[in-house]
Image (tube, rainbow, N blue to C red):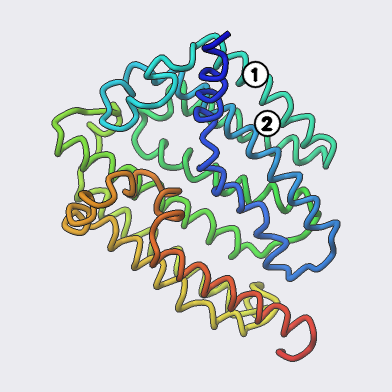
């Protein structure tokens, strides 16, 4: 019985609650539709709960499959399953129960939301079982998770969305996926240990070219969305005021992923690298200030437009 609290603590850690910040994307549709209806926000919150659960179930399954490779990784070796703190049978049973609960919550909100949750689970399972070893396809699998989170918010609330809005999210997700692989490849090259088989198919010059392409495309898609209803974008062209924060955020993230900057920061913040986007979001002051400025400006513009102060 003395070991039970340790197992429970390990299970909670294996569910990776710090990565639940990614699931806040389910609020995007309500936020950018400038909705004040409490029912809209409650539906988004239920979608958030469903996505937190299903993502944790996928993390458990992934860590079970990757436990041998994780033991060779400098930081992933400390994960509960790889370290042996969480037994594999308990992890698998917990994953199944958590996934079932997620689907039940989603079905209670909207049948379409359960479909989105199931689609996310299937894609991620396929990723865990083999697609993560396929170059380029692995990037699209990672990006699809972010896009489906945004779609979950749309389905749960019944709100519409601009195609530019969805394209922006998809491209920014690809950008983060490329940055994640770039950080993993650099760590592998530095330590002489390949922690992912797919990294053998990538090179830093290739990933830098992909990074440039998707970053530029994401910024242009966001600019077209913020231009307003003329281009089937945001409800007001005043959203162009948020564009500087987006480009600043992209620049900041690229700075943090630069090899020389990474070396300077590694000694002070060993766990903050672009291999873990959630650590950047939670730990980097520049990214936090950029997000705060972007969010504050978007809220002011949205409320101003809703109250008739801005066209």
Residue bearing mark 2: 118
Which residue is outermost to the front? 2
Q: Secondary structure at mark 2?
A: helix
Whole-percent x, y for residue 31 in the image: 69, 65
Q: Is residue 133 left or right of residue 4?
A: left
Whole-percent x, y for residue 275 in the image: 34, 44
Q: Is there a contact, CB below 8 Å, between mark 1 and mark 2?
A: no
Q: Secondary structure at mark 1?
A: helix
For the point 19% across and 54% down, which residue is it? Answer: 259
Name the mark nearer the viewer: 1 or 2.
Answer: 1
Circle nearer the N terminus (1, 2): 1
Q: Alpha-carbon neighbours of circle 1 within 10 Å: few (<14), some, or many (≥20)?
A: some
Q: Is residue 186 left or right of residue 295?
A: left
The image's mark for residue 173 is: none
Whole-percent x, y for residue 211 in the image: 32, 56
Q: Nearer the viewer, residue 281 or 195?
A: 281
For the point 39% across and 72% down, which residue is it? Answer: 248
Q: Image quadrant for the C terminus?
A: bottom right
Q: Image quadrant for the N terminus?
A: top right
What is the distance, in whole Å, between disc 1 and disc 2 at their CAs? 13 Å
Whole-percent x, y for residue 65 in the image: 44, 18
Q: Is residue 293 left or right of residue 32?
A: left
Q: Alpha-carbon neighbours of circle 2 within 10 Å: few (<14), some, or many (≥20)?
A: some
For the point 54% across and 74% down, which residue is it? Answer: 224
Does residue 197 lie above or below 221 as drawn? above
Q: Nearer the viewer, residue 241 or 130?
A: 241
For the point 74% across and 91% down, which residue is it? Answer: 309
Total number of numbered discs in the rendering? 2
Residue bearing mark 1: 96
Does residue 88 lie above or below 241 as drawn? above
Asked where in the image residue 55 lies, by quadrant, the reply is: top right
């Amino acid at each position: 019985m003395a070991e039970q609290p340790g197992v429970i603590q390990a299970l909670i850690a294996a569910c990776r609650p710090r990565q639940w910040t990614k699931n806040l994307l389910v609020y995007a549709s309500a936020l950018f539709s400038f909705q004040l209806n409490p029912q809209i926000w409650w539906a988004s919150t239920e979608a958030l709960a469903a996505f937190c659960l299903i993502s944790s179930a996928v993390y458990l399954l992934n860590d079970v499959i990757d436990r041998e490779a994780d033991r060779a990784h400098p930081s992933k070796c400390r994960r509960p399953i790889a370290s042996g703190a969480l037994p594999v049978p308990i992890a698998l049973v917990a994953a199944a129960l958590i996934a079932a609960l997620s689907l039940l919550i989603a079905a209670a909100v909207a049948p379409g939301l359960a479909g989105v949750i199931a689609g996310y689970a299937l894609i991620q399972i396929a990723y865990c079982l083999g697609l993560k070893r396929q170059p380029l396809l692995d990037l699209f699998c990672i990006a699809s998770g972010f896009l489906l989170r945004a779609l979950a918010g749309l389905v749960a609330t019944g709100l519409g969305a601009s195609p530019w809005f969805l394209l922006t999210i998809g491209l920014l997700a690809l950008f983060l996926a490329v940055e994640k692989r770039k950080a993993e490849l650099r760590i592998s090259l530095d330590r002489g240990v390949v922690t992912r088989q797919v990294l053998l198919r990538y090179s830093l010059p290739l990933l830098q070219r992909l990074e440039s392409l998707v970053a530029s495309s994401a910024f242009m898609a966001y600019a077209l969305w913020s231009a307003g209803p003329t281009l089937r974008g945001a409800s007001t062209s005043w959203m162009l005021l948020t564009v500087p924060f987006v480009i600043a955020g992209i620049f900041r993230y690229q700075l943090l992923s630069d090899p020389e900057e990474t070396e300077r920061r590694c000694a002070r913040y060993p766990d903050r690298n672009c291999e873990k986007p959630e650590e950047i979001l939670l730990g980097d002051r520049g990214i936090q200030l950029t997000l705060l400025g972007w969010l504050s400006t978007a809220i002011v513009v949205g409320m101003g437009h809703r109250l008739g102060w801005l066209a």
